């Protein structure tokens, strides 16, 4: 659906680095990943060269066997030469094996290193980036683009260098035999060069377009699988299939267009190389007839030229691989070049969990999405005292969720500042900060792992007692009844839990961390009244000496809070005890209590 | 490095799945019988891909034959030119032979140009068309498979099938098929030529054939396993990647980056070893083929040399023979690398055919019935259902919901509320008994009728990539903007949508990340309202709404539900209040059934719940 509008690489906005100057730049930057393997690569290249030599050494020996011992009827001599050939052949085969083995092992290692590097970078990129980039596009970069680069380094590049080496060697011999004929061969390089330049100009954007579209297709496939319930519930399978096929058809057409460009250049390469042989044959024959050249030289010349045929023909294919590796590198570096918007400031200081009192102050905090001129938060001033629990109430879309994403720096305010114990949170180390301030979201993200792993997400060293305690607070003891207890796999690949169960687990996960500041975004919305009451009672214990910011939708949840702040039109419109606000703020009454009136109606 | 060990290590964090089969299709079976079956399945799939393009492929083979002919002709032309044209000029001053050769060369060059151009363009068309057809077929299959299949197979695996597996097949169609055909042609031609030149020498040279076959079979056997495993590890990698990128907010909020990186690194390394294994085996095959080529040279040289010395063979014949042998082995050496691509693509085809082979649990009826003017009456007749063998969710439910009734389901987690909703919307079929709409078993109802009449709003509030208007429009594709806005107004979403920078054309971002949970819920509500079904199921559809929004939605619901059948699941009794009838469930059995006010007076379970609810409002 309208996938053009979600992040596709053509878009220009803050997440996309400026376009690279030349296509090769990014491919060249990969050298950083080659560096750890430099000795292995050096050895590898030596083996490649040795292998070429060992392969080339055998045919002359065969020739010598025929001219020498066989012609002379010398069986013993033949045996000697054959023994040498056998030894060389064995060496050639073993060298070939060793080089291929090493080549593939090294290339795979480099690919895996790049993948790990890309993953690490993606992890630290801010949520705004992830909201805009489709998973399929990221996945394409992590899998197929890196694969293309690897294949180029392991295949195309070796091939290209071998070809260039052969062309240079053969050209030198051609010049040595007859410079005039060699000039003809050299002249054929002009159209080859022109075609090659055109190829680069036309093929590069085509390859890029195809790779981009392939990411779109993956995204469409992923989305249709993830949203299968929504699709089935509405019976929109056929519609989704039609949309998917539109994307797939675009991919097909881009693939075909790309190959059409290739077909024009490759055919030119083949034809020119053959025509050059014809030209040399015709002119050479005349020169021979006029006595300027011997038949033997002409024969030798053309034989060499025939050997030139396949490196030239193959260069079209090599160039295509090279082009694809370049665009793949561009795509990969688009991600690498995106700076994380939220990171440690220079000189950021560490905080000690034990020393945190937990005073949280919002000072004129503003926030707006970059595509929206109107801010969602327009100057929030709010002080949460150490150990105090403050509830945030407000209408749908008033910015509650945005506000609570700020203290743990999942977003940074676009204006104003947030202080923890008087220190701007941007001056604290990010990892440190997030261990002091823990946020639980309304929509519980559970990973496909054991219950235990999910629970200990924010505190891997949590012991059994901590987990049990958190499960009790969140009324999530149902996990003990799962088929394998805490070892049961849950999440997408595991056992599916109900909305309420998921939410309780997410709450338990936040409680396990025992942070100084706990931020909860409507943490009880999916619970039934009875469970909610039990959770609240247990949670109240935890919150007694924890600073907390809790988004609430229900009067029942308000009971958790010492004071309530009403978020209205981007500001704190009212702040005080629930009972006070009920009598002083009509907006507050509207947001939190009119329900009973409706029920009665 | 033992793979079992690694798996155990992963099992630790991954936890135990309920069944080992959880995320598998038949493509993951690895006993000899299934492997054979898979092979033939994937061959059939390849046949299916090729069938519509038979003519085009025949044409492509024709082009390759001509191209092969032009390549073979070039050296011959050179020989002919040197032998005939030069003497003609120097002896008779006759340039006609040379001119003839020049013209022939020009023709051959043009022919070559045409062949290559046609081949590259045409083969791209065929290859891309085949992949397009396969992608579409796989997509439709995934859409047809039941929700329960998707719950165990996961979106990451679906993505892996549609991305990296397709990529493997694409690589095969793009690279090397022409080399394969040309090499096969070459092997046949040269074998014939060698037999003609000297049958005895040819027989000796061909002694190496069994060695090549053995090597090929060895590689085939070991690499099949290696490439299968590589497909599997890359799928696991993709599953993990997709999931952790989807939950990146939680990863960051809980500082899980290190652990997450570590786990990903484990999968990455597994995949690296698995991928490398096939390629390393290929290195053995490559070296082995070269060795066999050299062995053939050695044998022919020895035997042929001896024959020449004995006077049984001429020297020239031996020389020619040895040259041909080189031309026999060189392309084979190149082909060995293509074997890699072929094996990888075959494994990918196997994986895909495993999906296509998966039985559809909730299948469309063969003879679908339709309902002319639906009343919306739902019936459960002795319906039994369980997700797992040992846990019966509904032991035998009998229930009739008359057309137009709004019924609320109340009960603790696990009481079976959502299961009833999923059975009505046919996400699952009952294990026994029937669920029917207006007397028609849902299993006999045409898909279009089923989906047109019964719509469920699920707990997840899924938004698709696109604008808000597009997301609402999904309820009834082709709706005008007026109707979309109207639907949004009815459910009270209009106000916040208008406040967004581009109103209805605001992009919701990935999974609706631009909106809050409550806003997403309203959009999904508007979508369902637009769909205008006879039967509407709301599964916790208002849980994320704030009170003013919920009030608006409830007011809307009174009108919306007035003339349709509705099943409401909500833990907030405010939503239940609007129902005509409340059903209290416990362990899949109905323990209370009646009008809400009746039940409150009755003083049972519902009355207790209601009292708690009222208390919570203060």
Image: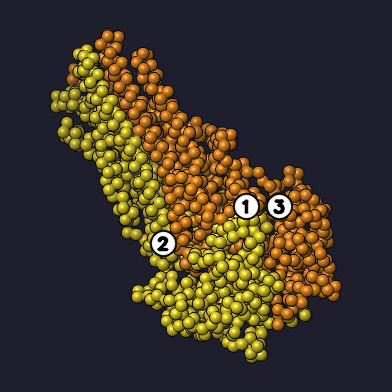
| Residue drawn at x 41%, y 61% as measured from the top left | A121
Describe the element under mark 1 as helix, strand or loop.
loop
Relative height, residue A283 to residue A76 (above, below) = below
Chain letter for mark 1: B
Where residue B137 sits: x, y (%)? 59, 45
Q: Is residue B275 left or right of residue B508?
A: left
| Residue drawn at x 61%, y 62% as measured from the top left | B462
Does label 3 lie on the same chain as label 1? yes
Q: Which numbered circle lies on residue A121? A: 2
Between the residue at mark 2 and the residue at mark 3, the CA separation in whole angstroms equals 45 Å
- The image quarter in which residue B550 lies: bottom right
The residue indicated by pointer 3 is: B390
| Residue drawn at x 21%, y 22% as measured from the top left | A64
Q: Residues within 10 Å of mark 3 (few under 14, many from 20)?
A: few
> Chain A hue?
yellow
Relative height, residue A537 to residue A192 (above, below) = below
The residue indicated by pointer 1 is: B18
Chain rendered orange: B
Q: Is residue A83 left or right of residue B63?
A: left
Eye-nearest disc, 2 or 3: 3
Between the residue at mark 2 and the residue at mark 1, the CA separation in whole angstroms equals 34 Å
Where residue A413 sits: x, y (%)? 46, 77
């Amino acid at each position: 659906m309208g996938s053009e509008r979600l992040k596709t690489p053509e878009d220009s906005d803050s997440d996309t680095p400026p376009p690279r100057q030349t296509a090769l730049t990014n491919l060249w930057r990969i050298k950083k990943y080659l560096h750890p393997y430099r000795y292995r690569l050096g050895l590898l290249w030596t083996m490649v060269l040795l292998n070429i030599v060992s392969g080339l050494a055998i045919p002359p020996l065969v020739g010598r066997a025929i001219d020498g011992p066989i012609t002379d009827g010398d069986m013993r001599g033949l045996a000697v030469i054959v023994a040498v050939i056998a030894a060389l052949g064995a060496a050639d085969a073993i060298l070939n094996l060793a080089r291929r083995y090493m080549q593939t092992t090294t290339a795979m290692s480099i690919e895996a290193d790049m993948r790990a590097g890309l993953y690490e970078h993606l992890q630290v990129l801010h949520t705004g980036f992830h909201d805009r980039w489709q998973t399929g596009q990221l996945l394409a970069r992590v899998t197929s683009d890196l694969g293309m680069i690897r294949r180029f380094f392991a295949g195309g590049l070796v091939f290209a260098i071998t070809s260039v080496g052969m062309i240079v060697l053969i050209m030198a011999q051609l010049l040595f035999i007859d410079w005039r004929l060699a000039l003809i061969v050299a002249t054929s390089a002009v159209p080859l060069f022109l075609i090659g330049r055109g190829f680069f100009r036309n093929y590069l954007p085509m390859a890029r377009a195809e790779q981009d579209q392939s990411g779109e297709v993956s995204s469409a496939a992923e989305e249709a699988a993830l949203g299968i319930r929504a699709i089935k519930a509405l019976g929109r399978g056929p519609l989704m299939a039609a949309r998917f096929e539109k994307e797939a058809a675009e991919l097909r057409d881009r693939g075909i267009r790309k190959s059409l460009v290739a077909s024009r250049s490759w055919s030119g390469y083949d034809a020119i190389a053959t025509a050059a042989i014809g030209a040399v044959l015709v002119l050479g024959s005349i020169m021979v007839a006029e006595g300027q050249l011997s038949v033997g030289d002409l024969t030798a010349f053309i034989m060499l030229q025939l050997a030139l045929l396949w490196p030239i023909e193959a260069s079209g294919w090599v160039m295509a691989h090279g082009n694809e590796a370049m665009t793949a590198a561009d795509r990969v570096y688009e991600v690498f070049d995106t700076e994380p918007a939220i990171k440690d400031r220079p000189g950021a200081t560490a905080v000690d969990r034990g020393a945190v009192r937990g005073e949280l102050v919002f000072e004129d905090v503003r926030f707006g999405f970059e595509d929206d001129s109107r801010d969602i938060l327009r100057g929030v001033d709010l002080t949460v005292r150490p150990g105090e629990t403050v509830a945030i109430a407000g209408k749908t879309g008033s910015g509650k969720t945005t506000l609570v994403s700020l203290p743990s720096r999942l977003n940074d305010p676009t204006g104003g500042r947030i202080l923890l114990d008087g220190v701007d949170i941007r001056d604290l180390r990010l990892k440190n900060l997030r261990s002091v301030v823990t946020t639980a979201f309304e929509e519980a993200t559970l990973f496909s792992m054991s219950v235990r792993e999910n629970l200990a997400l924010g505190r891997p060293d949590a012991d059994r007692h901590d987990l049990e305690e958190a499960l009790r607070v969140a009324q999530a003891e149902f996990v003990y009844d799962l088929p394998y207890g805490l070892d049961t796999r849950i999440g997408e690949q595991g056992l599916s839990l109900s909305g309420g169960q998921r939410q309780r687990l997410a709450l338990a996960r936040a409680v396990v961390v025992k942070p100084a500041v706990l931020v909860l975004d409507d943490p009880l919305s999916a619970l039934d009244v009875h469970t909610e009451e039990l959770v609240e009672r247990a949670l109240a214990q935890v919150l007694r000496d924890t600073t907390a910011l809790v988004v609430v939708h229900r009067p029942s949840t308000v009971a958790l809070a010492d004071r309530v702040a009403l978020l209205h039109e981007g500001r704190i419109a009212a702040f005080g005890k629930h009972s006070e606000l009920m009598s002083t703020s009509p907006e507050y009454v509207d947001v939190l209590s009119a329900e009973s009136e409706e029920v009665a109606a | 490095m033992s793979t079992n060990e690694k798996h155990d290590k992963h099992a630790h964090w991954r936890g135990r799945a309920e069944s080992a089969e959880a995320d598998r299709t038949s493509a993951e079976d690895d006993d000899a019988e299934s492997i054979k079956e898979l092979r033939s399945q994937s061959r059939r799939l390849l046949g299916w891909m090729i069938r519509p393009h038979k003519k085009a492929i025949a044409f492509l083979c024709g082009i390759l034959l001509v191209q092969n002919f032009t390549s073979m002709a070039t050296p011959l032309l050179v020989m002919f030119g040197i032998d005939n044209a030069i003497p003609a000029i120097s002896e008779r001053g006759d340039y006609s032979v040379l001119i003839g050769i020049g013209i022939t060369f020009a023709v051959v060059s043009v022919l070559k140009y045409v062949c290559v151009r046609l081949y590259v363009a045409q083969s791209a068309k065929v290859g891309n068309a085949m992949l397009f057809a396969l992608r579409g077929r796989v997509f439709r299959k995934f859409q047809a498979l039941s929700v329960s299949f998707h719950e165990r197979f996961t979106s990451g695996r679906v993505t892996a099938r549609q991305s990296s597996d397709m990529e493997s097949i694409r690589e095969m169609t793009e690279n090397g098929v022409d080399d394969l055909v040309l090499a096969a042609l070459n092997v046949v031609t040269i074998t014939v030529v060698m037999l003609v030149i000297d049958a005895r020498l040819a027989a000796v040279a061909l002694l190496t054939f069994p060695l090549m076959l053995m090597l090929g079979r060895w590689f085939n056997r070991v690499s099949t396993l290696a490439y299968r495993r590589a497909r599997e590890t890359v799928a696991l990698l993709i599953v993990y990647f997709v999931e952790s990128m989807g939950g990146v907010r939680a990863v960051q909020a809980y500082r899980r980056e290190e652990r997450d990186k570590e786990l990903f690194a484990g999968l990455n390394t597994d995949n690296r070893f698995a991928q490398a294994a096939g390629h390393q085996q290929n290195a053995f095959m490559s070296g082995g083929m070269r060795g066999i080529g050299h062995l053939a040279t050695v044998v022919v040289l020895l035997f042929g040399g001896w024959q020449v010395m004995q006077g049984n063979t001429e020297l020239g014949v031996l020389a020619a023979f040895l040259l041909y042998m080189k031309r026999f082995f060189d392309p084979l050496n190149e082909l060995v690398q293509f074997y890699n691509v072929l094996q990888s693509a075959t494994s990918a085809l196997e994986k895909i055919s495993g999906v296509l082979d998966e039985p559809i649990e909730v299948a469309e009826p063969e003879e679908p019935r339709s309902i002319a003017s639906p009343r919306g009456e739902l019936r459960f007749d002795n319906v039994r259902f369980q997700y797992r063998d040992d846990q019966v969710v509904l032991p035998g439910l009998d229930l009739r919901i008359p057309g137009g009734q709004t019924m609320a389901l109340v009960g603790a987690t696990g009481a079976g509320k959502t299961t009833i909703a999923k059975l009505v919307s046919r996400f699952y079929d009952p294990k026994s008994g029937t669920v029917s709409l207006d007397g028609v078993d849902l299993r006999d109802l045409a898909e279009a009728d089923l989906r047109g009449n019964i719509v469920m709003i699920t707990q997840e509030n899924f938004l698709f990539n696109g604008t808000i208007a597009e997301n609402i429009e999904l309820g009834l594709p082709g709706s005008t903007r007026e109707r979309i806005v109207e639907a949004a107004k009815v459910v009270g979403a209009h106000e916040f949508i208008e406040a967004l920078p581009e109103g209805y054309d605001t992009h919701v971002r990935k999974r609706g990340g631009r909106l809050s949970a409550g806003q997403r819920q309203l959009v999904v509500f508007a979508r369902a309202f637009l769909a205008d079904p006879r039967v509407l199921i709301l599964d916790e559809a208002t849980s994320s709404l704030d009170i003013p929004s919920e009030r608006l939605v409830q007011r809307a619901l009174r009108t919306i539900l007035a003339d349709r059948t509705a099943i409401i699941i909500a833990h907030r009794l405010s939503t239940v209040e609007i129902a005509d009838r409340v059903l209290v469930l416990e362990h899949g059995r109905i323990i209370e059934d009646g009008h809400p006010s009746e039940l409150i007076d009755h003083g049972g379970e519902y009355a207790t719940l209601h009292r708690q609810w009222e208390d919570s409002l203060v």
